[in-house]
Image (tube, rainbow, N blue to C red):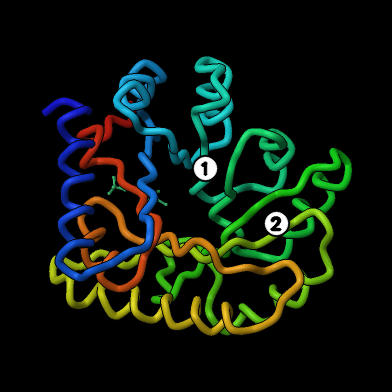
Amino acid sequence: MSISTNLDEIQNNIKNIKDELSINRDITLIAVSKTVDSQRVLEAYNHGQKEFGENKVQELVKKYEEINNSDVIFHMIGHLQTNKVKYLVNKVKLIQSLDRLSLLKELEKRGKNNNYIFNCLIELNLAKEESKTGLHEEDLLELIEKIEECEFVKVKGLMTVAPYYEDLEKVRVYFRKLKNIYDDLANKNFKNINMEYLSMGMSHDYKVAIEEGSNMIRVGTSIFGERNYN
Ligand SMILES: *Cc1c(COP(=O)(O)O)cnc(C)c1O
């Protein structure tokens, strides 16, 4: 299947779910382009796809420079090492993987040095899977308190990578949980925290995620095919 056919199919699926459930909100599709070369990113872009997700800073910066088109928008969705933060100034719409205090500190510092605001999503690891990064729910308040002290970091929502289950009803539980936290935070008055994006849902579970309130899905395999890590 070609990239454009795949994109059409996913947009169609999104439309169908929206129609079925009478959902009015916009749902942003992030094409996850990790391991995918710039040429294929451009192929997707030429078919109307604007936003892309990368999980490695070096790879993101390389494509950003190769593509050199401010209309192609990148998101950092992978684990972010503090020593790589500086390379992301001016290059990403959202850092979706804010998951710890040390990273927050570094973002604030680099933001201040460059007079640049980092827009972020807090990544939560609701199932506390050891193989995954992401903040545990009980540490959320502490991080939020520190975010409120920042000048160069703004939080625009939440992100999660749900545990993998064949049985999507088991996955649904985590999406529902994240939506509850999202609604809870949206009802509070924070200076630096505004709930705009609920980033949840990947190739195998995005339909359930949308049913549970996602407005941003991150899809790789279903657009670009199986990844080749060589
Ligand atoms: C790789 C990745 C995705 C996309 O996963 P697919 O199963 O290929 O759709 C989404 N989110 C994150 C954080 C990822 O690392």
Q: Is residue 192 above or below residue 136?
A: above
216 or 149, which lies in front?
216
| The N terminus, quarter of image | top left
Q: Residue at x 32, y 26 (%)?
A: 44
Position in image of residue 30 (x %, y %):
39, 44
Q: Is mark 2 within 8 Å of ligand 1?
A: no
Closer to the N terminus: mark 2 or mark 1?
Answer: 1
Pointers 2 and 1 in contact (CB under 8 A)?
A: no
Secondary element at tag 2: helix
Q: Would residue 174 be found to the left or right of residue 184 on screen?
A: left
Residue at numbered disc 2: 103
Q: Residue at x 33, y 31 (%)?
A: 229
Q: Name which quarter of the figure residue 179 lies in.
A: bottom left
Position in image of residue 124 (x %, y %):
50, 69
Q: Is residue 159 above or below residue 5?
A: below
Q: CA distance from mark 2 to mark 1?
A: 16 Å
Q: Amino acid at mark 1?
A: His
Secondary element at tag 1: strand
| The C terminus, quarter of image | top left
Circle on res. 75: 1
Position in image of residue 154 (x %, y %):
70, 59
Q: Would residue 106 be found to the left or right of residue 26 on screen?
A: right
Q: Residue at x 70, y 56 (%)?
A: 103
Q: Would residue 101 be found to the left or right of residue 98 on screen?
A: right
Residue 209 visible in the picture = no
Q: Amino acid at mark 2?
A: Leu
Residue 104 visible in the picture = yes
Q: Name which quarter of the figure residue 97 lies in.
A: bottom right
